[in-house]
Amino acid sequence: MVALDKPDARAALLLAEQLQGSGCWAKVGLELFYAAGPDIIGELKARGFRVFLDLKLHDIPNTVKGGSRSIARLGVDMFNVHAGGGLAMMQAAVQGVEDALDAGEASAKPLIIAVTQLTSTNQATLNDQLGIPGTVEEAVLRCARLTKDAGLDGVVASPLEVGAIKAACGSTFLTVTPGIRPQGADIGDQQRITTPYDAVQGGTDYLVIGRPITGAADPAAALQTILKEMSS
Ligand SMILES: O=C(O)c1cc(=O)[nH]c(=O)n1[C@@H]1O[C@H](COP(=O)(O)O)[C@@H](O)[C@H]1O
């Protein structure tokens, strides 16, 4: 999944067109969605992309239910919420999608996943700033179990945690992993990272990659290099 973190529709579609035919998904996040609006989803779908709408919903259950119903109407293939919103909030996301399906507003059910702990969070952030005790992996697993209990399809986590999540929640529980950095790439604000090869070896279902592709002089070539590394 390539994160189309671009400031407007024109820049995002220019990038998407370079990646067309590669089989990758397009991830639409805050930067692009707030600038381009819901129409960007249709533009990407028309170009053959499966779309992950990454808006990380985190609000009271009733608001998340309504937001999820609106998202389901857009025809995205996947969207996410924050597990930190709790069980009732995540159940409300599922209910919002079901309401859209029952009302005939959506024709297919998108995958719903929950962010466990952001991949920019490290042990010190968790304990010292957020006041959450224990290891990052313990916090991630707590969120993953809660997400499963709420009936969602899987979680967003670091590729470092995939083995533990699969052991706790089962092999069909999806893992979507940002925090991917090819050897020698700029790490930036990510904290819990692996290479594309290690992520695949660890059993992750979907790799999410932004800057190593979008910041390259030739994004299509960068993607091909990563795809080769994933399968070698
Ligand atoms: O939900 C996400 O997609 C997400 C969760 C998370 O914990 N960490 C994370 O990096 N992301 C997103 O994944 C993408 C990673 O981009 P790069 O760091 O540029 O590869 C960004 O669009 C982030 O918003």
Image: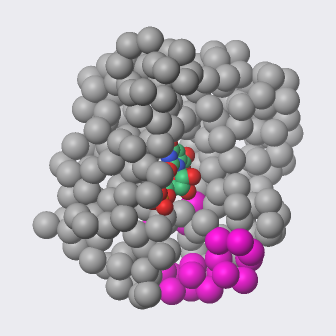
* Image quarter of residue 97: top right
Identity of the residue drawn at 35% across and 19% down = 135
Using the image, determine if residue 131 lies above or below residue 196.
above
Could you tell whether 67 is left or right of 171 in the image? right
Figure check: 104 above or below 134: below
Q: Residue at x 64, y 36 (%)?
A: 81
Residue nearer the viewer, 80 or 186: 186
Q: Quadrant of residue 90?
A: top right
Residue sitting nearer the eye, 212 or 127: 127
Judge left or right: residue 135 versus residue 229.
right
Q: Is residue 8 magenta?
A: yes
Q: Residue furthest left?
A: 232
Is 202 or 213 nearer to us in this picture?
213
On the question of residue 200 being in view, the answer is no
User: Where residue 111 sits in the image (x, y, percent)?
Assistant: 57, 43
Q: Is residue 62 above or below residue 12?
A: above
Measured as percent of width and height from the top left, residue 166 is found at 30, 29
- Residue at the image position 72 percent from the left and 83 percent from the top: 10
Rendering coords of residue 155 (x, y %):
48, 35
Q: Which residues are magenta?
A: 6-27
